[in-house]
Amino acid sequence: MDIAMSEARYALDAGEVPVGCCILDKNSNLIAKASNNTNRSGNATEHCEMIVLRRILASKIDASKCVLYVTCEPCIMCVSALQECGIGKVVYGCPNPRFGGCGSVLTVHKGYGRFPPLQVEPGVMAKEAVEMLQEFYSTGNPRAPENKRKRPLKL
């Protein structure tokens, strides 16, 4: 999770929503790491999870033997992509009460017959993840619409 936190810090310093992640293989070797890139790219799908999934798919590594560490609960889109790619487990920091796909909003991670359930472990370094998000949102996301730019962060 330290690698994911470092990626989140990088995102924060770059003016991005501070979410970072990494994928480790069954021997705990780093396969890929990334931070959110939605503001810089102008692409709302450039979540860190989507970036590392593209990298792992290009590497031909067995995703079912890998663990994704991410600082914030993956959104509904990302959970679906993680399941589609067959990631073995997701360890995340804080909940995502607006878009979370591992139980905060929807329970996409349960699979519901289309995919096997995604194993999740919540709450790892949650306090640190929340603090970074609060730091970012205290000034507001510069790419957010004006009426949504500076609202209280509820986690």
Image: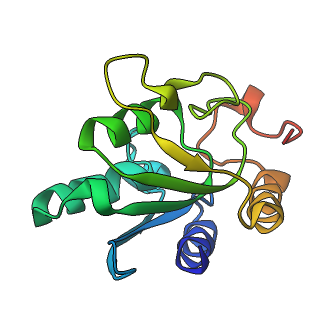
Residue 33 lies, in percent from the top left, at: 39, 71
Q: Percent x, y for residue 42?
A: 40, 44
Image vertical order of residue 11 relative to residue 95, above or below? below
Most extreme residue toward the top, as rendered? 113
Q: Is residue 151 left or right of residue 147?
A: right
Of 64 and 100, which appears nearest the observer?
64
Picture layout, residue 79 above or below residue 130: above
In percent of the image, x 44 and y 33: which residue is there? 117
The image quadrant where one finds the C terminus is: top right
At x 62%, y 30%, the residue is 99
Looking at the picture, tell me which residue is in the foreground, 14 or 85: 85
- Tally of numbered discs: 0
Residue sitting at 30 percent across and 61 percent down?
65
Q: In the picture, residue 32 is in which quadrant?
A: bottom left
Identified at 38% across, 47% down, the residue is 46
- Front residue of this view, candidates 30 and 27: 27
Does residue 120 appear to the left or right of 50 in the view shown?
Answer: right
Look at the image and tell me in which quarter the N terminus lies: bottom right
Above or below for 25 versus 102: below
Q: How is the image coloured?
A: rainbow
